[in-house]
Image (cartoon, grey):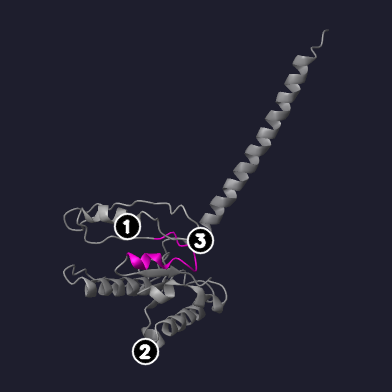
């Protein structure tokens, strides 16, 4: 909420209840309730449903679209609505193969969509970020540009930019050996479910055997 008087952060997840929209139909009412607390900044995150989903631009003063290099064929970029409306674009997971080519392609598409033919590609507000890396240069650039955009619209906020720290070596938040940690969790869950199914099947067989024994008692 208020970053100076109240350092607490409030988060609320709201289901959209619909398959073809990225924000809840009640988001306007929810934002009005939040504004009663007089916060400095409200961050609204959509469900991220893919090519459509530009509804957030109707509510946000500054909008940012987060995507990855794995968006598919280059023709798919023409179908992404948010490249028409976003003030900033983050190309996350930029350490993946083909990320540099994807960065150029997204910048070109942003340039076409916004008719910025006279501006060089490097000036497009599209940033290659690595959320898994500490002190990532692209993430710092993105944040500072976001702060600049917000300050331009609300000069009374006077948000501070971030000064990138000097590091002697690359520091990753997720160690290289644990990059697949989400896949490992899925695999472990599948193994657990398979083991439970085996135990359940064994229990069913024992239950049936016990039922037969009770139905046909043997006398010795």
**Camera sees residue 165:** no
Vertical arrangement, residue 197 with respect to residue 29, above or below: above
Residue 109 rendering spot, x and y as whole percentages: 46, 81
Mark 1 Cα shell of 10 Å, populated few (<14), some (14-19), many (≥20): few
Distance between mark 3 and mark 1 Cα atoms = 38 Å
Please report the bounds of the magenta region as a residue range: 46-59
Q: Residue at x 68, y 37 (%)?
A: 198
Distance between mark 1 and mark 2 Cα atoms = 36 Å
- Residue topped by disc 2: 119
Residue 44 rendering spot, x and y as whole percentages: 34, 60
- Residues marked 1 and 2 touching at CB (< 8 Å): no
- Residue topped by disc 3: 179
Q: Write down the quadrant of residue 88 in the picture.
A: bottom left
**Camera sees residue 153:** yes
- Secondary structure under badge 1? helix
- Secondary structure under badge 3? loop
- Residue topped by disc 1: 28
Q: Residue at x 47, y 67 (%)?
A: 52
Front one among 148 and 191: 148
């Amino acid at each position: 909420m208020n970053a100076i008087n109240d350092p607490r952060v409030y988060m609320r997840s709201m289901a959209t209840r619909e398959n073809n929209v990225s924000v809840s139909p009640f988001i306007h009412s929810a934002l009005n309730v939040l504004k009663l607390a007089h916060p400095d900044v409200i961050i609204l995150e959509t469900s991220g449903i893919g090519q459509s989903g530009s509804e957030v631009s109707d509510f946000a003063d500054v909008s940012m679209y987060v995507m990855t290099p794995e968006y598919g064929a280059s023709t798919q970029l023409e179908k992404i609505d948010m490249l028409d409306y976003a003030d900033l674009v983050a190309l996350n997971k930029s350490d993946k193969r083909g990320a540099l080519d994807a960065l150029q392609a997204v910048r070109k598409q942003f340039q076409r969509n916004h008719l910025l033919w006279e501006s060089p590609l490097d000036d497009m507000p599209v940033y290659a970020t690595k959320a898994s890396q500490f002190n990532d240069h692209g993430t710092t650039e993105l944040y500072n540009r976001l702060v600049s955009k917000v300050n331009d619209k609300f000069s009374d906020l006077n948000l501070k930019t971030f000064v990138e720290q000097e590091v002697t070596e690359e520091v990753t938040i997720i160690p290289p050996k644990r990059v697949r940690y989400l896949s490992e969790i899925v695999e472990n869950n599948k193994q657990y479910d398979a083991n439970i199914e085996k135990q359940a099947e064994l229990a069913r067989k024992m239950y049936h055997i016990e039922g037969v024994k009770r139905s046909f008692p043997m006398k010795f």
